[in-house]
Image (cartoon, rainbow, N blue to C red):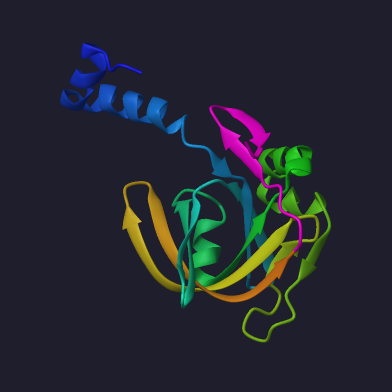
């Protein structure tokens, strides 16, 4: 792809820069996850694609959560969360959770709770291909989002992996060439 003169000039105008950045981000393919937590006896969840591994030793996972999301404050308050990685067959499940009102998201899918003492009551989706339970290590606020680094405390993982991916406004899955 060759950049046009108009695209190169996008850096000079903040509105055009934001539009160009949004367009560029459409090309980032990401794993679809559901981030879940519980605080004060209430469960919270949101669909997210902004997750990444940071370190294997020690195991650390990073998530980005919009500060206006209904899940943000409870997640920060509780200091623990689960990243549920959806499989390729979970498109409908992810879409239903994303469209549901905050309190109705747990009416979608089969939810269980972590048994670990430190992570007690953190919900996870039984249909997910993996569930990674974390405690918050650090948090940084940048623009509209909080970047949250979590120490991995427990993992439930299926032997097969075929993650649900999201790119350019569409769902897909990985194929090996």
The residue closer to the viewer here, 161 or 84, is 161
Q: Is residue 172 magenta?
A: yes
Q: Residue at x 75, y 80 (%)?
A: 115
Q: Residue at x 67, y 47 (%)?
A: 163
Q: Quadrant of the C terminus?
A: top right
Outermost residue toward the left?
12
The answer to which image quadrant residue 55 occupies is: bottom left
Q: Is residue 89 placed above or below 132 in the rendered structure?
A: above
Looking at the image, residue 21 sits to the left or right of residue 54; the answer is left
Outermost residue toward the right?
110
Question: Whole-percent x and y of residue 3?
Answer: 28, 17
Question: Whole-percent x and y of residue 123?
Answer: 71, 66
Looking at the image, residue 131 sits to the left or right of residue 72; the answer is right
Q: Is residue 7 placed above or below 157 in the rendered structure?
A: above
Q: Is residue 37 magenta?
A: no
Predominant SS of the magenta segment:
loop
Magenta-highlighted residues: 158-177
């Amino acid at each position: 792809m060759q950049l046009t003169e108009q695209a190169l000039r996008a850096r000079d105008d903040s509105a055009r820069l934001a539009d160009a950045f949004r367009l560029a981000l459409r090309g980032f393919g990401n794993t679809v996850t559901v981030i879940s937590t519980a605080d004060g006896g209430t469960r919270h969840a949101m669909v997210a694609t902004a997750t990444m591994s940071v370190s294997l030793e020690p195991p650390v996972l990073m998530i980005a959560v919009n500060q206006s999301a209904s899940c943000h404050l409870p997640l920060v308050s509780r200091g623990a969360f689960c990243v549920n990685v959806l499989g390729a067959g979970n498109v409908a499940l992810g879409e239903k959770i994303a469209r549901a009102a905050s309190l109705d998201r747990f009416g979608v899918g089969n939810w269980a709770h972590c048994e670990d003492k430190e992570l007690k009551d953190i919900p996870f989706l039984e249909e997910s291909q993996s569930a990674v339970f974390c405690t918050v290590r650090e948090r940084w606020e940048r623009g509209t989002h909080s970047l949250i680094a979590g120490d991995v405390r427990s993992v439930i993982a299926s032997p097969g992996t075929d993650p649900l991916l999201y790119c350019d406004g569409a769902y897909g899955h990985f194929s090996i060439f």
